[in-house]
Image: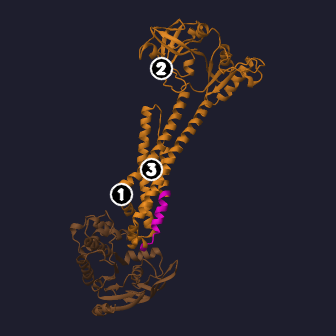
Amino acid sequence: MKTSDLFEETSLALLANKARSSLTILGIVIGIASVIAMIAIGQGAKNNIEYSIQSLGSNLVLVMPGMQRSAGAGVSQARGSATTLTLDDAEAIASQVTAVAAVAPDLSGRYQVTAKGTNSNTSVVGTTASYTAIRSVEVAEGNFITEHNVKSLSKVAVLGPTARDDLFGEDSNPVGQTIRIKSIDFKVIGVTAEKGGSGFSNQDDMIFIPISTAQQFLVGSNKVSTISVQAEDQESMAQMQQDITDLLLARHNITNAALADFSTMNQSDVIATASSVTDTFTALLGSVAAISLLVGGIGIMNMMLTTVKERTREIGLRKAIGAKRRDISWQFLLEAMMLTFLGGIIGIILGWLISLIIRQFANIAASVSLSSVFLAFGVSAAIGIVFGYYPARSASRLNPIEALRYE
Amino acid sequence: MIECRHITKVYNTGAGAAPALQDVSFSIAAGEFVAIIGPSGSGKSTLMHILGALDTPTGGEYFLDGKDVSQLSDDDLADIRKNKIGFVFQSFNLLPRATVLRNVMLPLVYADIPKVERERQAKIALHNAGLDESHYYHLSNQLSGGQMQRVAIARALVNNPSLILADEPTGNLDTKTGEIVLGTFQRLNRDHNHTIILITHEHDVAEHADRIIHIRDGRLIDDVKNGQRREIIENS
């Protein structure tokens, strides 16, 4: 039997029972589409998280105050509550640790901010000029805080776009206007560009002021809440992290590293942790979807078994006029494979559409990867073969005499 | 052309061995129109299956065109059926929801004959089976019983077989349509020299053949030319 004839016989047989064929295909479509869409969503979530971590800046090591221990008592307070880091620490890191590209200390807190009748509770970050380079912040209008502002304790502020929208209305230009933080007037000198960071910290809803001003007028101490240190390149990050730890331990007169009153966080560790979480998440979503694919496969087998039963006489006739076992088993196997193949193609398209819709409306950068398409395709082909094999084999083994007599 | 030597068929059922055919021997020459007659349970269906290479005998030899086909494998039997035998069944066994032409071309699909040639041969076969062109593209389940059986005859003819086996071809037809179908067989035998074996339990049907082989209880009890048919009928 020629291959082209085999395909013709198969498609005619499937067309002869359109409703049943399409319902069976639907089972595979749903399975494949959900596998594709789920993996796309998982990948999208992973990309989102990685992006928002990257948007903090690149090659960063963050130094944060640790818990403060009262000597001997072993009572620990919450992490970050300590005021153990100072501007001097930041300067020491900048001058004494090798491979440091830039250092930006900051002192943040949430304050009620008012401007001409509007008011907003937002994050006020006291920092230095190097913050823009380290945290990849760009200035859309006006200027960022300068070294001079820091030295002279200027009461100037740079608004994030969200903070600007809240205080002055969307897309307005507030440069030159005045805002009040803790009853102190600040002159707006710039607005940063939108970063679009979402997730655990919205980088757009911030107000930047000189760190010295924040220490002097808002907090009243010389502590800093984070020191962001940028390494020259990714390879030197681990060594730099170690050097910073050693330096600060020495500066704080702590001999036992386990009792450090600060902690350091390497950005790539954060990404790796977050990625492993999202990978697990993706695998979970994928395996739930795979179950529906399995159910679709069982649907194929069910349909093929029914078909073989129903068409017993036809099989008998085909054998009587000279069809060999091979011809019969190929015909039925091909029917199953054609069903899954069609279901696979429609499923891939549907899954792709679903991830497009999610991308559009759910703010997840869902992306269909080529590998998940290949995986889905391979799986659907395998389902066709696995679940079509048994019915096809039983069809080919029918005795023509009994098959012809079958009522 | 056909030679059966001491054909025996024993079915092994759970209750023990049940002989369906015992020591049946006869031969049929090319161009003969033979009826095999016998009541139900006589073994005539078993004989037909063996003659049609659907089954193999447990004993004896069956030569078709000089070749012993009694010991062949399943796939070799399929080849014999494909090339040498055309079947006509009581219940037509056409593919539903397929056109007349496609039904007739089906055996040629398995014989790897090119598409254009298939259609040509199918049209000749349909013409010889007495079905006119207006029906070629009708679906087989839209036809009358007589038309269906003629499509089935055309399907049996299409691969130009050595032997046409008709198993109760008139069983599902009324007398008048049955006559037309039997007339078709007679014409095919007379005008196209096809060898035809007709299996039936009805004497009126068997009378259309030139020779009648009578089977009862798995044994051949009579083998006569049509001229002597009265005798057989009276004997039975």
Q: Which residue is mark 2?
A: A193
The answer to whether residue B187 is above or below residue A72 is: below
- Image colouring: by chain
Most foreground residue, A324 or A63: A324
Q: Is A389 one of the magenta-colored residues?
A: yes
Quadrant (top left/top right/bottom left/bottom right) for the C terminus of chain A: bottom left
Question: In 3D space, how far apart are the residues under numbered discs 1 and 2 (Cα atoms)?
Answer: 60 Å
Residue A311, picture quadrant? bottom left
Quadrant (top left/top right/bottom left/bottom right) for the N terminus of chain A: bottom left
| Residue type of the residue flagged with mark 3 | Ile
Q: Residue B180 at what x, y percent from top left?
A: 23, 78
Circle 3 — which element? Answer: helix
Badge 2 local density, few (<14 within 10 Å), some, or many (20+)? Answer: some
The answer to whether residue A303 is above or below residue A71 is: below
Q: Residue B67 at what x, y percent from top left?
A: 43, 84
Which stretch did the figure color magenta?
A386-401
Assess whether mark 3 and mark 2 are in contact (beta carbons under 8 angstroms): no
Q: Residue A281 at what x, y percent from top left?
A: 55, 38
For image coordinates 55% across by 8% down, the residue present is A182
Most foreground residue, B97 or A35: B97
Q: Which dot marks residue A28?
A: 3
Badge 1 local density, few (<14 within 10 Å), some, or many (20+)? Answer: few
| Residue type of the residue flagged with mark 2 | Ala
Subunit under mark 3: A
Question: In 3D space, how far apart are the residues under numbered discs 3 and 1 (Cα atoms)?
Answer: 17 Å
For image coordinates 44% across by 76% down, the residue present is B77
Q: Which chain is brown?
A: B
Q: Which residue is mark 1?
A: A17
